[in-house]
Amino acid sequence: MVSLEEALASAESVGLDLVEVSTTDPPVCKIMDYGKYRYKQSKKLHDAKKSQTIIQIKEIKLKPKTEEHDIQVKLKHIKKFLKNHDKVKISMMFRGREIAFTDIGRNLMERIKFELINEGIIDQEPRLEGRNMVMIVSPKKQ
């Protein structure tokens, strides 16, 4: 155990800083270049932010009466989103009396699910939430 004056003198003689590492009793200190330490910490944080990926959720809206060509175009968009590593929320909206024919919407969702079996993983199966049927698809891991 070294006194504070001796520790400060030895740090000053080397040209470095005396940094308190732990606030226990007695305190634990280390002789180091504090500016260089802070710089390395900020670089480490910056590199961690650079390597992380941000996943966005894209939404595609359908109706039970959506025509075949429009479904094919929307499937193409869904596949493009999945290739860009984005999650896709597929919403089937039922308006007015269409809510009585949810089986038509469910069949369409099942067909879309079958089309996307190679491109993505189904996170949430088609589920009725109020007047909307929702399914969430995420990209396959590489």
Image (cartoon, helix red, strand yellow):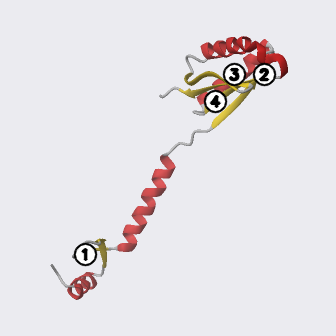
Amino acid of disc 4: Val
Q: Which mark is residue 87?
A: none
Quadrant position of residue 84:
top right
Amino acid of disc 1: Pro
Circle 1 SS class: loop
Badge nearest the viewer, 2 or 1: 2
Q: Which residue is mark 1?
A: 27
Point out residue 124 in the picture as x, y percentages from the top left corner: 57, 25
| Figure quadrant of the N terminus | bottom left
How far is disc 4 from disc 3 in space, using C-alphas? 12 Å
Badge nearest the viewer, 3 or 1: 1
Point out residue 18 in the picture as x, y percentages from the top left corner: 29, 78
Q: Which residue is mark 2?
A: 94
Say whether disc 2 or disc 1 marks the residue closer to the N-terminus: 1
How far is disc 3 from disc 1 in space, using C-alphas? 63 Å
Q: Which residue is mark 4?
A: 88
For label 3, the crowd category at 10 Å Cα-Cα, with few meaning under 14, some 14 to 19 and many 20 or more, is: few
| Location of residue 16 with respect to 123 vertically, above or below | below
How far is disc 2 from disc 4 in space, using C-alphas? 19 Å
Circle 3 SS class: helix
Amino acid of disc 2: Phe
Asked whether the beta carbons under mark 4 and mark 3 sit within 8 Å of each other, the answer is: no
Q: Which mark is residue 76?
A: 3
Circle 4 SS class: strand
Amino acid of disc 3: Lys
